[in-house]
Image (spheres, helix red, strand yellow):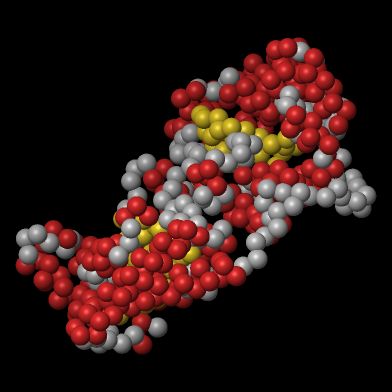
Protein backbone atom coordinates (compact mmCIF):
# COMPACT_ATOMS: atom_id res chain seq x y z
CA UNK A 1 0.00 0.00 0.00
CA UNK A 2 2.62 2.56 1.04
CA UNK A 3 4.73 1.97 -2.06
CA UNK A 4 1.79 3.25 -4.14
CA UNK A 5 1.70 6.59 -2.32
CA UNK A 6 2.90 9.51 -4.45
CA UNK A 7 5.19 11.44 -2.13
CA UNK A 8 5.80 14.13 -4.75
CA UNK A 9 2.39 15.69 -4.12
CA UNK A 10 2.66 19.47 -3.96
CA UNK A 11 0.43 22.52 -3.83
CA UNK A 12 1.34 25.98 -5.06
CA UNK A 13 1.63 28.89 -2.66
CA UNK A 14 -1.16 30.68 -4.57
CA UNK A 15 -3.60 27.79 -4.20
CA UNK A 16 -2.61 27.28 -0.58
CA UNK A 17 -3.26 30.91 0.31
CA UNK A 18 -6.59 30.68 -1.51
CA UNK A 19 -7.85 27.48 0.11
CA UNK A 20 -6.31 27.33 3.58
CA UNK A 21 -8.04 30.34 5.20
CA UNK A 22 -11.43 29.05 4.06
CA UNK A 23 -10.68 25.55 5.39
CA UNK A 24 -9.77 27.04 8.77
CA UNK A 25 -13.14 28.78 8.91
CA UNK A 26 -15.00 25.63 7.85
CA UNK A 27 -13.25 23.47 10.44
CA UNK A 28 -14.07 26.00 13.16
CA UNK A 29 -17.70 25.94 12.07
CA UNK A 30 -17.65 22.14 12.16
CA UNK A 31 -16.37 22.20 15.73
CA UNK A 32 -19.17 24.52 16.84
CA UNK A 33 -21.85 22.43 15.12
CA UNK A 34 -20.44 19.21 16.57
CA UNK A 35 -20.44 20.75 20.04
CA UNK A 36 -24.05 21.82 19.66
CA UNK A 37 -24.98 18.32 18.46
CA UNK A 38 -23.07 16.65 21.31
CA UNK A 39 -20.81 14.78 18.86
CA UNK A 40 -17.53 13.65 20.50
CA UNK A 41 -14.55 13.24 18.19
CA UNK A 42 -11.20 11.46 18.33
CA UNK A 43 -8.50 12.49 15.85
CA UNK A 44 -5.42 10.24 15.79
CA UNK A 45 -2.07 11.28 14.34
CA UNK A 46 0.57 8.64 13.76
CA UNK A 47 3.49 8.67 11.35
CA UNK A 48 7.23 8.66 10.85
CA UNK A 49 9.47 10.62 13.20
CA UNK A 50 9.92 14.14 11.78
CA UNK A 51 6.98 13.68 9.40
CA UNK A 52 5.41 16.87 10.74
CA UNK A 53 2.76 15.67 13.20
CA UNK A 54 3.52 18.31 15.79
CA UNK A 55 3.43 21.23 13.37
CA UNK A 56 0.26 19.97 11.74
CA UNK A 57 -1.52 19.53 15.08
CA UNK A 58 -0.40 23.02 16.03
CA UNK A 59 -1.95 24.50 12.90
CA UNK A 60 -5.06 22.38 13.37
CA UNK A 61 -5.68 23.64 16.88
CA UNK A 62 -5.26 27.25 15.77
CA UNK A 63 -8.47 26.83 13.79
CA UNK A 64 -10.38 25.50 16.81
CA UNK A 65 -11.89 26.95 19.94
CA UNK A 66 -9.35 25.95 22.64
CA UNK A 67 -12.17 25.38 25.13
CA UNK A 68 -13.40 22.40 23.12
CA UNK A 69 -10.37 20.18 22.58
CA UNK A 70 -7.46 18.52 24.34
CA UNK A 71 -4.21 17.27 22.80
CA UNK A 72 -2.72 14.09 24.27
CA UNK A 73 0.88 13.04 23.70
CA UNK A 74 1.01 9.43 24.84
CA UNK A 75 4.22 7.53 24.25
CA UNK A 76 5.83 5.14 26.74
CA UNK A 77 3.45 4.45 29.65
CA UNK A 78 4.31 5.86 33.06
CA UNK A 79 4.83 3.54 36.02
CA UNK A 80 1.27 4.23 37.16
CA UNK A 81 -0.16 3.56 33.70
CA UNK A 82 1.78 0.31 33.31
CA UNK A 83 0.05 -1.04 36.44
CA UNK A 84 -3.29 -1.16 34.65
CA UNK A 85 -4.51 -2.74 31.38
CA UNK A 86 -2.75 -1.01 28.51
CA UNK A 87 -5.93 0.56 27.07
CA UNK A 88 -6.81 2.15 30.43
CA UNK A 89 -4.86 5.35 29.78
CA UNK A 90 -6.68 5.90 26.48
CA UNK A 91 -10.09 5.39 28.08
CA UNK A 92 -9.11 8.02 30.65
CA UNK A 93 -8.47 10.57 27.88
CA UNK A 94 -11.61 10.07 25.81
CA UNK A 95 -13.66 13.18 25.01
CA UNK A 96 -17.06 13.91 26.47
CA UNK A 97 -20.04 14.79 24.26
CA UNK A 98 -19.25 17.66 21.90
CA UNK A 99 -15.52 17.71 22.61
CA UNK A 100 -12.43 16.70 20.61
CA UNK A 101 -9.51 14.53 21.74
CA UNK A 102 -6.44 14.83 19.51
CA UNK A 103 -3.88 12.05 20.01
CA UNK A 104 -0.26 12.64 18.99
CA UNK A 105 0.61 8.95 19.22
CA UNK A 106 -2.15 6.70 20.45
CA UNK A 107 -3.06 3.07 21.14
CA UNK A 108 -1.09 2.25 17.96
CA UNK A 109 2.08 2.85 19.98
CA UNK A 110 1.48 -0.68 21.26
CA UNK A 111 1.70 -2.41 17.87
CA UNK A 112 4.37 -0.16 16.39
CA UNK A 113 6.91 1.26 18.84
CA UNK A 114 6.56 -1.35 21.59
CA UNK A 115 6.37 -4.23 19.15
CA UNK A 116 9.36 -3.17 17.07
CA UNK A 117 11.45 -2.44 20.16
CA UNK A 118 10.71 -5.96 21.37
CA UNK A 119 8.87 -4.74 24.48
CA UNK A 120 5.96 -7.06 23.67
CA UNK A 121 5.86 -10.45 21.97
CA UNK A 122 4.29 -11.19 18.59
CA UNK A 123 1.49 -12.97 20.45
CA UNK A 124 0.82 -9.84 22.52
CA UNK A 125 0.89 -7.70 19.38
CA UNK A 126 -1.64 -9.96 17.68
CA UNK A 127 -3.88 -9.77 20.74
CA UNK A 128 -3.48 -5.98 20.77
CA UNK A 129 -4.82 -5.72 17.21
CA UNK A 130 -7.98 -7.49 18.30
CA UNK A 131 -8.32 -5.26 21.36
CA UNK A 132 -7.82 -2.13 19.23
CA UNK A 133 -10.61 -3.21 16.90
CA UNK A 134 -12.87 -3.87 19.89
CA UNK A 135 -11.96 -0.53 21.44
CA UNK A 136 -12.66 1.47 18.29
CA UNK A 137 -15.85 -0.44 17.56
CA UNK A 138 -17.13 0.27 21.08
CA UNK A 139 -16.32 3.97 20.73
CA UNK A 140 -17.92 4.40 17.31
CA UNK A 141 -20.97 2.37 18.36
CA UNK A 142 -21.22 4.75 21.32
CA UNK A 143 -21.39 7.74 18.97
CA UNK A 144 -17.72 8.87 18.86
CA UNK A 145 -16.38 9.99 15.49
CA UNK A 146 -12.87 8.56 14.92
CA UNK A 147 -10.47 9.48 12.15
CA UNK A 148 -6.84 8.35 11.94
CA UNK A 149 -3.95 9.84 9.97
CA UNK A 150 -0.62 8.29 9.01
CA UNK A 151 1.90 11.02 8.14
CA UNK A 152 4.09 9.52 5.45
CA UNK A 153 7.57 10.42 4.18
CA UNK A 154 10.28 8.19 2.74
CA UNK A 155 13.56 7.28 4.46
CA UNK A 156 15.60 9.80 2.45
CA UNK A 157 13.33 12.71 3.32
CA UNK A 158 13.29 11.61 6.95
CA UNK A 159 17.11 11.68 7.12
CA UNK A 160 17.14 15.12 5.53
CA UNK A 161 14.75 16.42 8.19
CA UNK A 162 16.84 14.90 10.95
CA UNK A 163 19.79 16.89 9.61
CA UNK A 164 17.79 20.13 9.62
CA UNK A 165 16.65 19.52 13.20
CA UNK A 166 20.19 18.70 14.35
CA UNK A 167 21.57 21.97 12.96
CA UNK A 168 19.25 24.06 15.12
CA UNK A 169 20.16 24.08 18.83
CA UNK A 170 16.48 24.63 19.66
CA UNK A 171 15.42 21.38 17.96
CA UNK A 172 18.55 19.18 18.07
CA UNK A 173 17.31 17.47 21.24
CA UNK A 174 14.38 15.97 19.32
CA UNK A 175 16.60 13.71 17.22
CA UNK A 176 17.14 10.86 19.64
CA UNK A 177 18.57 7.40 19.16
CA UNK A 178 15.06 6.08 18.57
CA UNK A 179 14.72 8.46 15.61
CA UNK A 180 17.84 7.12 13.96
CA UNK A 181 16.89 3.56 14.84
CA UNK A 182 13.57 3.98 13.04
CA UNK A 183 15.31 5.30 9.94
CA UNK A 184 17.83 2.48 10.00
CA UNK A 185 15.01 -0.09 10.39
CA UNK A 186 12.84 1.58 7.78
CA UNK A 187 12.00 -1.68 5.99
CA UNK A 188 10.82 -3.36 9.20
CA UNK A 189 8.75 -0.32 10.06
CA UNK A 190 7.13 -0.26 6.63
CA UNK A 191 6.04 -3.88 7.09
CA UNK A 192 4.60 -3.14 10.55
CA UNK A 193 2.81 -0.01 9.35
CA UNK A 194 1.37 -1.85 6.35
CA UNK A 195 0.05 -4.57 8.63
CA UNK A 196 -1.41 -2.03 11.06
CA UNK A 197 -3.20 -0.09 8.36
CA UNK A 198 -4.57 -3.27 6.78
CA UNK A 199 -5.76 -4.74 10.09
CA UNK A 200 -7.38 -1.62 11.51
CA UNK A 201 -8.72 0.36 8.55
CA UNK A 202 -12.47 0.10 9.07
CA UNK A 203 -15.46 1.97 7.68
CA UNK A 204 -16.22 3.63 11.01
CA UNK A 205 -12.60 4.31 12.05
CA UNK A 206 -10.70 4.77 8.78
CA UNK A 207 -7.08 5.63 8.12
CA UNK A 208 -5.98 8.40 5.78
CA UNK A 209 -2.38 8.26 4.57
CA UNK A 210 -1.09 11.81 4.24
CA UNK A 211 1.68 12.56 1.75
CA UNK A 212 3.76 14.74 4.07
CA UNK A 213 6.76 15.69 1.93
CA UNK A 214 5.31 19.19 1.55
CA UNK A 215 3.75 20.60 4.75
CA UNK A 216 1.28 22.79 2.84
CA UNK A 217 -0.13 19.84 0.89
CA UNK A 218 -0.39 17.72 4.09
CA UNK A 219 -2.19 20.53 5.90
CA UNK A 220 -4.77 21.00 3.14
CA UNK A 221 -5.44 17.25 2.91
CA UNK A 222 -5.94 16.83 6.67
CA UNK A 223 -8.22 19.88 6.95
CA UNK A 224 -10.32 18.76 3.98
CA UNK A 225 -10.58 15.20 5.26
CA UNK A 226 -11.67 16.23 8.75
CA UNK A 227 -14.14 18.80 7.49
CA UNK A 228 -15.80 16.26 5.22
CA UNK A 229 -15.91 13.55 7.93
CA UNK A 230 -17.48 15.91 10.44
CA UNK A 231 -19.99 17.21 7.90
CA UNK A 232 -20.99 13.65 6.99
CA UNK A 233 -21.31 12.67 10.65
CA UNK A 234 -23.45 15.70 11.45
CA UNK A 235 -25.71 15.01 8.47
CA UNK A 236 -26.12 11.38 9.56
CA UNK A 237 -26.82 12.56 13.11
CA UNK A 238 -29.57 14.92 11.94
CA UNK A 239 -31.25 12.34 9.71
CA UNK A 240 -31.02 9.45 12.17
CA UNK A 241 -34.16 8.35 13.93
CA UNK A 242 -33.66 8.47 17.69
CA UNK A 243 -33.58 5.07 19.35
CA UNK A 244 -36.76 4.39 21.28
CA UNK A 245 -36.23 3.88 24.99
CA UNK A 246 -39.19 2.03 26.43
CA UNK A 247 -39.59 -0.01 29.62
CA UNK A 248 -39.48 -3.76 29.24
CA UNK A 249 -42.99 -5.23 28.88
CA UNK A 250 -44.25 -7.97 31.13
CA UNK A 251 -42.90 -11.23 29.62
CA UNK A 252 -45.29 -13.97 28.63
CA UNK A 253 -45.32 -17.36 30.29
CA UNK A 254 -42.95 -18.83 27.68
CA UNK A 255 -40.27 -16.17 28.05
CA UNK A 256 -38.09 -18.54 30.07
CA UNK A 257 -37.37 -22.21 29.61
CA UNK A 258 -37.84 -23.78 33.02
CA UNK A 259 -35.94 -24.58 35.09
CA UNK A 260 -33.64 -21.59 34.67
CA UNK A 261 -30.20 -21.15 36.20
CA UNK A 262 -31.96 -19.27 39.04
CA UNK A 263 -34.54 -22.03 39.55
CA UNK A 264 -31.71 -24.52 40.02
CA UNK A 265 -30.27 -22.53 42.94
CA UNK A 266 -31.04 -24.31 46.23
CA UNK A 267 -32.36 -21.54 48.45
CA UNK A 268 -32.76 -23.90 51.42
CA UNK A 269 -28.97 -23.92 51.94
CA UNK A 270 -28.20 -22.44 55.36
CA UNK A 271 -25.66 -22.27 58.17
CA UNK A 272 -26.11 -22.09 61.91
CA UNK A 273 -24.62 -19.12 63.73
CA UNK A 274 -21.92 -21.34 65.28
CA UNK A 275 -20.90 -22.80 61.91
CA UNK A 276 -20.89 -19.31 60.43
CA UNK A 277 -18.64 -17.78 63.11
CA UNK A 278 -16.09 -20.60 62.88
CA UNK A 279 -15.84 -20.42 59.10
CA UNK A 280 -15.84 -16.63 59.09
CA UNK A 281 -12.85 -16.45 61.42
CA UNK A 282 -10.86 -18.97 59.36
CA UNK A 283 -11.64 -17.32 56.01
CA UNK A 284 -10.84 -13.82 57.23
CA UNK A 285 -7.45 -14.99 58.38
CA UNK A 286 -6.79 -16.60 55.00
CA UNK A 287 -8.00 -13.55 53.09
CA UNK A 288 -5.77 -11.19 55.04
CA UNK A 289 -2.73 -13.30 54.18
CA UNK A 290 -3.78 -13.73 50.55
CA UNK A 291 -4.34 -9.99 50.10
CA UNK A 292 -0.71 -9.32 51.01
CA UNK A 293 0.54 -12.11 48.78
CA UNK A 294 -1.57 -10.62 45.98
CA UNK A 295 0.15 -7.28 46.49
CA UNK A 296 3.58 -8.88 46.27
CA UNK A 297 2.54 -10.84 43.19
CA UNK A 298 1.08 -7.67 41.59
CA UNK A 299 -2.26 -9.32 40.86
CA UNK A 300 -5.23 -6.95 40.36
CA UNK A 301 -8.62 -8.20 41.55
CA UNK A 302 -12.14 -7.10 40.56
CA UNK A 303 -15.12 -8.31 42.60
CA UNK A 304 -18.62 -7.55 41.31
CA UNK A 305 -21.81 -7.68 43.38
CA UNK A 306 -25.21 -7.77 41.72
CA UNK A 307 -28.46 -9.12 43.11
CA UNK A 308 -32.07 -8.59 44.01
CA UNK A 309 -33.02 -5.64 46.20
CA UNK A 310 -32.60 -6.65 49.87
CA UNK A 311 -30.55 -9.71 48.90
CA UNK A 312 -27.77 -8.66 51.27
CA UNK A 313 -25.08 -7.12 49.04
CA UNK A 314 -24.09 -4.50 51.60
CA UNK A 315 -23.78 -6.96 54.46
CA UNK A 316 -21.88 -9.40 52.27
CA UNK A 317 -19.39 -6.72 51.20
CA UNK A 318 -18.95 -5.61 54.80
CA UNK A 319 -18.03 -9.14 55.94
CA UNK A 320 -15.64 -9.52 53.03
CA UNK A 321 -13.79 -6.25 53.64
CA UNK A 322 -13.47 -6.79 57.39
CA UNK A 323 -10.92 -9.45 56.54
CA UNK A 324 -8.85 -7.15 54.33
CA UNK A 325 -6.25 -4.43 54.84
CA UNK A 326 -8.09 -1.18 53.94
CA UNK A 327 -4.98 0.19 52.21
CA UNK A 328 -5.30 -2.48 49.54
CA UNK A 329 -8.94 -2.31 48.49
CA UNK A 330 -11.63 0.13 47.37
CA UNK A 331 -15.41 -0.30 47.39
CA UNK A 332 -17.12 1.51 44.51
CA UNK A 333 -20.90 1.97 44.89
CA UNK A 334 -22.55 2.39 41.49
CA UNK A 335 -25.69 4.49 41.25
CA UNK A 336 -27.31 6.43 38.40
CA UNK A 337 -24.67 8.05 36.16
CA UNK A 338 -23.74 11.67 36.83
CA UNK A 339 -24.06 14.37 34.15
CA UNK A 340 -20.33 14.00 33.40
CA UNK A 341 -20.65 10.22 33.09
CA UNK A 342 -23.62 10.52 30.72
CA UNK A 343 -21.46 12.62 28.40
CA UNK A 344 -19.01 9.73 28.00
CA UNK A 345 -19.22 6.16 26.74
CA UNK A 346 -21.12 4.15 29.36
CA UNK A 347 -18.07 1.96 30.14
CA UNK A 348 -15.88 5.01 30.84
CA UNK A 349 -17.00 5.38 34.45
CA UNK A 350 -16.06 1.76 35.18
CA UNK A 351 -12.67 1.93 33.49
CA UNK A 352 -11.90 4.85 35.84
CA UNK A 353 -12.06 2.49 38.83
CA UNK A 354 -10.16 -0.50 37.45
CA UNK A 355 -7.58 -1.47 40.12
CA UNK A 356 -3.86 -1.25 39.56
CA UNK A 357 -1.68 -4.30 40.09
CA UNK A 358 -1.76 -5.68 43.62
CA UNK A 359 -5.02 -3.97 44.57
CA UNK A 360 -8.67 -4.96 44.89
CA UNK A 361 -11.75 -3.09 43.66
CA UNK A 362 -15.19 -4.20 44.83
CA UNK A 363 -18.12 -2.95 42.76
CA UNK A 364 -21.46 -2.64 44.56
CA UNK A 365 -23.45 -2.92 41.33
CA UNK A 366 -21.57 -2.49 38.09
CA UNK A 367 -21.57 -2.29 34.31
CA UNK A 368 -24.29 -4.92 34.36
CA UNK A 369 -26.76 -2.14 35.04
CA UNK A 370 -26.80 -1.69 31.27
CA UNK A 371 -28.48 -5.07 30.76
CA UNK A 372 -30.53 -5.00 33.97
CA UNK A 373 -32.04 -1.79 35.32
CA UNK A 374 -31.39 0.25 32.16
CA UNK A 375 -32.97 -2.46 30.03
CA UNK A 376 -35.95 -3.08 32.28
CA UNK A 377 -36.71 0.56 33.07
CA UNK A 378 -36.13 1.81 29.53
CA UNK A 379 -33.14 4.02 30.33
CA UNK A 380 -31.37 2.75 27.19
CA UNK A 381 -32.60 1.53 23.83
CA UNK A 382 -32.98 -2.11 22.81
CA UNK A 383 -30.04 -1.74 20.42
CA UNK A 384 -27.87 -0.38 23.24
CA UNK A 385 -28.51 -3.15 25.76
CA UNK A 386 -28.27 -5.88 23.12
CA UNK A 387 -24.80 -4.81 21.97
CA UNK A 388 -23.74 -4.37 25.61
CA UNK A 389 -23.45 -8.15 26.10
CA UNK A 390 -20.55 -8.37 23.62
CA UNK A 391 -19.00 -5.12 24.88
CA UNK A 392 -19.05 -6.34 28.48
CA UNK A 393 -17.46 -9.67 27.53
CA UNK A 394 -14.76 -7.80 25.59
CA UNK A 395 -14.16 -5.46 28.53
CA UNK A 396 -13.78 -8.32 30.99
CA UNK A 397 -11.56 -10.32 28.64
CA UNK A 398 -9.21 -7.34 28.33
CA UNK A 399 -9.00 -7.18 32.12
CA UNK A 400 -8.37 -10.93 32.29
CA UNK A 401 -5.69 -10.74 29.58
CA UNK A 402 -3.86 -8.26 31.80
CA UNK A 403 -3.96 -10.79 34.63
CA UNK A 404 -6.93 -9.43 36.57
CA UNK A 405 -8.85 -11.90 38.72
CA UNK A 406 -12.56 -11.32 38.14
CA UNK A 407 -15.13 -12.64 40.62
CA UNK A 408 -18.83 -11.92 39.96
CA UNK A 409 -21.65 -12.61 42.41
CA UNK A 410 -25.39 -12.70 41.85
CA UNK A 411 -27.16 -12.71 45.24
CA UNK A 412 -30.34 -14.70 44.78
CA UNK A 413 -33.40 -14.75 47.00
CA UNK A 414 -37.01 -15.65 46.27
CA UNK A 415 -39.94 -13.25 46.26
CA UNK A 416 -41.23 -14.38 49.64
CA UNK A 417 -37.91 -13.70 51.35
CA UNK A 418 -37.62 -10.32 49.67
CA UNK A 419 -41.09 -9.33 50.91
CA UNK A 420 -40.22 -10.42 54.44
CA UNK A 421 -37.06 -8.30 54.40
CA UNK A 422 -38.87 -5.30 52.96
CA UNK A 423 -41.48 -5.50 55.71
CA UNK A 424 -38.80 -5.92 58.38
CA UNK A 425 -36.96 -2.85 57.12
CA UNK A 426 -40.13 -0.79 56.98
CA UNK A 427 -41.01 -1.78 60.54
CA UNK A 428 -37.54 -1.18 62.06
CA UNK A 429 -36.67 2.51 62.61
CA UNK A 430 -32.93 1.89 62.30
CA UNK A 431 -33.41 0.14 58.94
CA UNK A 432 -36.09 2.29 57.31
CA UNK A 433 -33.46 4.17 55.30
CA UNK A 434 -32.76 0.94 53.45
CA UNK A 435 -36.25 0.70 51.93
CA UNK A 436 -37.44 3.16 49.27
CA UNK A 437 -40.41 3.60 46.98
CA UNK A 438 -38.13 2.49 44.14
CA UNK A 439 -37.58 -0.86 45.87
CA UNK A 440 -41.32 -1.47 45.92
CA UNK A 441 -41.64 -0.45 42.25
CA UNK A 442 -38.81 -2.79 41.28
CA UNK A 443 -40.55 -5.63 43.10
CA UNK A 444 -43.58 -5.17 40.86
CA UNK A 445 -41.30 -5.87 37.89
CA UNK A 446 -39.89 -9.13 39.24
CA UNK A 447 -40.78 -11.05 36.07
CA UNK A 448 -39.06 -8.54 33.81
CA UNK A 449 -35.95 -8.52 35.98
CA UNK A 450 -35.91 -12.31 36.14
CA UNK A 451 -35.82 -12.56 32.32
CA UNK A 452 -33.03 -9.95 32.20
CA UNK A 453 -31.02 -11.63 34.97
CA UNK A 454 -31.19 -15.08 33.41
CA UNK A 455 -30.06 -13.75 30.02
CA UNK A 456 -27.27 -11.78 31.70
CA UNK A 457 -25.97 -14.83 33.55
CA UNK A 458 -26.16 -17.08 30.50
CA UNK A 459 -24.49 -14.64 28.08
CA UNK A 460 -21.75 -13.20 30.29
CA UNK A 461 -20.56 -16.13 32.39
CA UNK A 462 -17.23 -16.92 30.77
CA UNK A 463 -14.14 -18.97 31.55
CA UNK A 464 -12.22 -15.81 32.41
CA UNK A 465 -15.08 -14.09 34.30
CA UNK A 466 -17.60 -16.64 35.59
CA UNK A 467 -20.70 -15.82 37.62
CA UNK A 468 -21.20 -17.35 41.05
CA UNK A 469 -24.77 -17.50 42.31
CA UNK A 470 -24.98 -16.92 46.05
CA UNK A 471 -28.01 -18.64 47.56
CA UNK A 472 -28.91 -15.75 49.84
CA UNK A 473 -32.17 -16.66 51.58
CA UNK A 474 -29.75 -17.40 54.42
CA UNK A 475 -27.44 -14.39 54.67
CA UNK A 476 -24.91 -16.35 56.70
CA UNK A 477 -24.57 -19.00 54.02
CA UNK A 478 -24.20 -16.40 51.25
CA UNK A 479 -21.47 -14.54 53.15
CA UNK A 480 -19.39 -17.65 53.72
CA UNK A 481 -19.78 -18.82 50.14
CA UNK A 482 -18.66 -15.40 48.89
CA UNK A 483 -15.57 -15.36 51.11
CA UNK A 484 -14.70 -18.92 50.12
CA UNK A 485 -15.11 -18.12 46.41
CA UNK A 486 -12.87 -15.06 46.63
CA UNK A 487 -10.28 -16.98 48.66
CA UNK A 488 -10.20 -19.82 46.13
CA UNK A 489 -9.92 -17.43 43.16
CA UNK A 490 -7.02 -15.50 44.68
CA UNK A 491 -5.19 -18.64 45.75
CA UNK A 492 -5.55 -20.10 42.24
CA UNK A 493 -4.17 -16.89 40.67
CA UNK A 494 -1.16 -16.88 42.99
CA UNK A 495 -0.38 -20.51 42.17
CA UNK A 496 -0.43 -19.71 38.45
CA UNK A 497 2.15 -16.91 38.82
Residue located 62% across and 33% down the image: 364
Q: Nearer the viewer, residue 155 or 185?
A: 155
Residue located 40% across and 72% down the image: 227
Residue 481: x %, y % from top left: 72, 28
* Residue 324 lies in quadrant: top right
Quarter placement of the N terminus: bottom left
Left or right: 396 as drawn, with respect to 95? right
Position of 261 relative to 277 (above/below): below
Residue 486: x %, y % from top left: 63, 32
Q: Nearer the viewer, residue 445 or 88?
A: 445
**How many numbered markers are drawn?**
0
Residue 120: x %, y % from top left: 40, 58
Residue located 76% across and 23% down the image: 475
* Residue 186 lies in quadrant: bottom left
State the residue lying farthest toward the right: 253
Can I make out residue 283 in this image? no
Left or right: 77 as drawn, with respect to 275? left
Residue located 79% across and 43% down the image: 449
Residue 3: x %, y % from top left: 34, 85
Left or right: 133 as drawn, with respect to 78? right
Can I make out residue 331 in this image? yes
Amino acid sequence: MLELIDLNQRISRKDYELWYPQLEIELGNCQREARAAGLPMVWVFEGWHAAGKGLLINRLTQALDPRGFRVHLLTSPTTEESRRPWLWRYWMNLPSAGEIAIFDHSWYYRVLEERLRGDISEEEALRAYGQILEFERQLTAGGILIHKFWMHVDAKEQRRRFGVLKKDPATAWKVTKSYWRQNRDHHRWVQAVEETLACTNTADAPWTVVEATQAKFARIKVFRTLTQRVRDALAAHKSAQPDKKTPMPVPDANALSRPTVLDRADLTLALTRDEYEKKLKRLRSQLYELEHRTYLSKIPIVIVYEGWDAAGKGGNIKRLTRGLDPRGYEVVPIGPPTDEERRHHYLWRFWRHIPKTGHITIFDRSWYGRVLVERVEGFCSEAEWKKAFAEINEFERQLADFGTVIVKFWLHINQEEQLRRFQERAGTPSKQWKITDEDWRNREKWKQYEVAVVEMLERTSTVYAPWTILEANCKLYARIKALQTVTDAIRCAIRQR
